[in-house]
Image: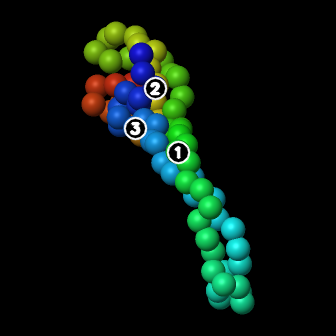
Amino acid sequence: MSRECYLTGKKNLVVNSVTRRGKARAQGGVGRKVTGVTKRVQRANLHKRTIREGGVTKTVWLSANALRTLSRGPYRGIELL
């Protein structure tokens, strides 16, 4: 089972981490310089929860956004247990 939201499809993103040095021009420096770019993972805010869908109980990953939606009541035939 992959770490992907069952309801919204949110998952981890690969992004760049940019390292800079120097003082900004607006603060009297010569400007910020990029000294390195490395890849990193931005993790989705996922939680393992139990749901009931069509009478079947499942344990799935849900995003925080999906948990808020399901806490209001059943959504698309899915309810939070």
Q: From the viewer's perspective, tell me whether residue 17 is left or right of residue 1.
A: right
The residue that appears at 48% across and 48% down in the rendered structure is 15
Residue 32 locus on image (x, y percent): 63, 74
The residue that appears at 62% across and 61% down in the rendered structure is 35
Q: In the rendered structure, which amino acid carries the disc numbered 3?
A: Lys
Residue holding disc 3:
10
Secondary structure state at the residue bearing disc 1: strand
Residue holding disc 1:
39
Residue 14 locus on image (x, y percent): 46, 42
Residue 64 visible at all: no
Q: In the rendered structure, which amino acid carries the disc numbered 2?
A: Arg
Above or below 28: residue 14: above
The residue that appears at 34% across and 25% down in the rendered structure is 78
Q: Relative to the observer, which residue lies in front, 54 or 5? A: 5
Secondary structure state at the residue bearing disc 2: loop
Q: How is the image coloured?
A: rainbow
Above or below 36: residue 44: above
Task: State if disc 1 and disc 2 touch (CB < 8 Å).
Answer: no
Secondary structure state at the residue bearing disc 3: loop
The residue that appears at 42% across and 16% down in the rendered structure is 1
Q: Earlier in the sequence, mark 2 or mark 3?
A: 2
Residue 7 visible at all: yes
Residue holding disc 2:
3
Q: In the rendered structure, which amino acid carries the disc numbered 1?
A: Lys
Task: State if disc 3 and disc 2 touch (CB < 8 Å).
Answer: no
Q: Earlier in the sequence, mark 1 or mark 3?
A: 3
Q: Earlier in the sequence, mark 2 or mark 1?
A: 2
**Label 2 Cα crowd, 10 Å radius (few <14 / some 14-19 / many 20+):** some
